[in-house]
Every structure is written in C-alpha cells, then in structure tokens.
Amino acid sequence: MCVCVCVCVCVCVCAQWDRWRVSKVNSDYSVCPSYPSAVIVPREVDDDKLIRSARFRQGGRFPVLSYCHLRNGMVIMRSSQPLTGANKKRCKEDELLLQAVIDGSELGYIIDLRSAQQAQQARMTGGGFESKSCYSHWKRIHRHHERGKVVQESLIKLVEACSDLSHSVDRWLSKLENSKWLSHVHSVLSTAGLVVECVERDGHSVLVHGSEGTDNTLLVSSLAQLILDPASRTVTGFLCLLEREWIQAGHPFQQRCAHSAHSHARLKQECPSFLLLLDCVWQVWRQFPLALEFSEALLLRLAQEVYASNYGTFLCNSEQERYAAGVKENTHCLFQCLLKPDIEEQYLNPLYEATDLAIWPSVHPQSLQLWTGMFLRWTEYAQNMEEAREEVWSIVKEHRERV
C-alpha cells in the first residue's frame, strides 16, 4: 500500500468509532475477490452476516463504509447491486446491515447509478435493486450513467476530434459535442453533487451503487468526498483517496486501461473511468482555483501513469491480484514518489488557500469546459497555457519571498 497505512485509517479517524469496526472477514479474499482484506462495517453486524450479505451482492461487494462526514456523522457507503432476480429474493442479513447504518428514525438514500428501467431489466439476469418493502428506511433515487463501451467510444471520438485541428471551428465544435464526453463529465459531477446535498445539506446517509460497483460507483463516491472533505483536497489526502477508493476498492485498472484511445485494438472491458474522474477533478480545480492544494500538473501525471508507468501502483485489477503477483515487493510506488518533497513541489497549486467548507461545482453546460491541458496537450494553445502557469508560479514565489 502506498499512502494509507491500511484501508481503515483515512476513514475511521473521522468516524464515530463506537458505531463502526474493522472487519477482516475478507482476509483471504474469499468473501469478495475485488475487496481489500480489511473493510469498515457497522459494529453491530458480525462477520457471518457480512458473508451472507456478500452472497446477495454481485461479485460479493457488500455495503462498506467509504466516508463519514465530520460535521454530522452521516456516511457514504458503497456496494454492488443486490441479486434479487426475477423472483424478488431477499436477504435479511443485507437488510440488517443497511439498517445498522442509520438510526430507526432516520432516512437514508440509495443512489442507483442506473435508470429505473435498467434496474428492472437487471432482475431478468439475476440482478436487481432494493425494494421499498424490504428496505423501508431507505429511499431509492435513480441517476442514469453510461458505462463500459459507450464511455470508451466517447473518448475515442474526443481524441480523434482533438487530433485533427484542420477543421473549421464550427466543424470541430460539432465533433466535440458528438463525442458526448462532456455529457459524461456532467453526469458524474451532477450525481456527486446530489450525494453531497444528501449528506451535507439534508443530513442523510447515502449508499451508492450501480451494477458491479467498480466504476461509476467509485467515480461518484470519490468525487463526492473531494467536494465534502477538505483533507481530500490536499496532495496527500487526494492520493490517499485514490488509494482507498480506487486501488484498494478494486477498480480493475488492468482491464480498463489496457490501451489508450489512440490504439486500434479494442477490448470489451476497456473503459476510461479513471480518466473521467481526473477530468471531473480538473473541472472542480478550474472552478475553484484556490480550493485544491495540487495543480493540473498532478492530474496530467496521473493520467499518463495509469496507461504507461514505471511504477506498480496501477498494476492488476485488485489487491488480491497484486498480492499474488508480489507487486509491493517487486515494484516502486508512484504515490510515495510523488510525495517526496522535491517532487511534490512540482505539483503544488501556488494559489491554494485551505477551507473547511464544502465546495459546490456548477454543472451548467457553460461551466464545463474541454480539458485542454489533457486533450489538446501538444498544441500551441496548451504550450502557451503552460508558460502562463509557470509565470504565475514565479510571481507567487517571488511575492512569498518578499513577505
């Protein structure tokens, strides 16, 4: 592990510890192959109940604690879809697990990252959703998110448009719009904002899931934490967030990032979920230039490393696979490298001013822009922007030395 001492540390420090516990039920990865060996769950739910809940969730991804809000103690949980099937099966242990998350008088929200129609159709193939009758203290909200091939094709179209600048402006803008990439950015930011609204403004706990719980679920949960949690906006906190919510949480990097959008090869399981996260973080950074301790340069470095890296951080698809392959013993950790003082300095935001408040990014179409530093990286425009950023850095450093 790179930044976090373990899966629990970054979350439990801010949790009401008497309500939660660290479970090693998955210590041999037999309960859920894609989960880490240690997870945080409600204290009153024993390991036997967790095992039964895991059998009721796709891929064994039972609900686990992702984040606890300091201000009011509300939490963000994440999981995969329940396996209710066409016969509307139920699992009392799974119901008890979610009931333990909230007090009997409270209401929780389940943010299902599929349309209501998709969730209904999932029952025909063994999946499904939480019914109102079985989860009476939870209200389900559907927010449709594209996934897999659709998002990958969107990235390919975007890269093709950005690679050919010979078109007229109108033609280029048309190709950009047709890629629908910014529509995916909008969807993620909008749903993350909904999660933040439930937790921060309304004071309700949230469970986030789609189907597998390894892509859009991680996108929404991690972005919501960036918006809510000041610690996640520091360099160390952000890398810890990625370690916990993506690497340890079982995002299949090897499958999703096998090729870049420039490759002619096509794999069924490719999807630029992590790149989409970085784009969303860039949108937040652009709208709140003082709120994040890190600069765009860190996001660009991560975007590069996830597809081609000399480090072992993004290897394999899960903690179990990395353990079996001896990644920790045989490779270097990217995050440890980035946190070396002389290297970290390259990625600091000179305008950073810490704030304890949540930040609320706008999702209006005019507020979302193409990430030029990424997708137009080698054009004259991007190079000019880089020179401008270096000049800003120089001015700020000179000012600080005088003060």
Image: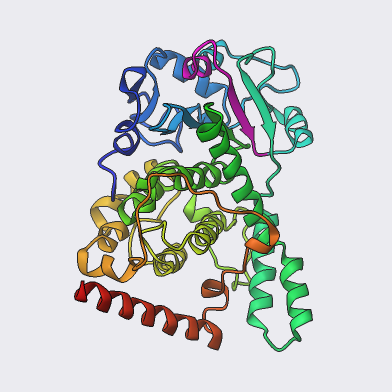
Identify the image's colour scheme: rainbow, by chain, secondary structure or one colour.
rainbow
Please tell me how many numbered marks the rendered image carries: 0
Q: What range is drawn magenta here?
A: 97-113
In what quadrant of the picture does the C terminus appear? bottom left
On screen, residue 163 above or below 119: below
Which of the two residues, 281 or 244, is positioned nearer the viewer here?
281
Q: Is residue 101 magenta?
A: yes
- Where is residue 371 drawn, in percent x and y? 57, 69
Q: Is residue 109 above or below residue 89?
A: below
Q: Is residue 176 above or below residue 380?
A: above
| Relative to 333, 177 lies left or right | right
Residue 362 visible to an observer of this rendering = yes
- Residue at the extreme front of the image, as rendered: 403
Specify whether 390 is left or right of 84.
left
Residue at the spot 26% in from the left edge and 60% down from the top edge: 339
In-image side of 17 versus 33 (left or right)? left
256 in magenta? no
Q: Position of residue 122 (x, y in %)?
A: 73, 32
Which residue is pictured at 27% across the width and 65% down the height? Answer: 344
Q: Quadrant of residue 119?
A: top right
- Rendering coords of residue 110 (x, y %): 61, 28
Q: Is residue 79 visible?
A: no
Between 325 and 205, the residue placed more toward the observer is 205
**Residue 67 on image: x %, y %:** 42, 35
Residue at x-position 48% and y-position 85%: 383
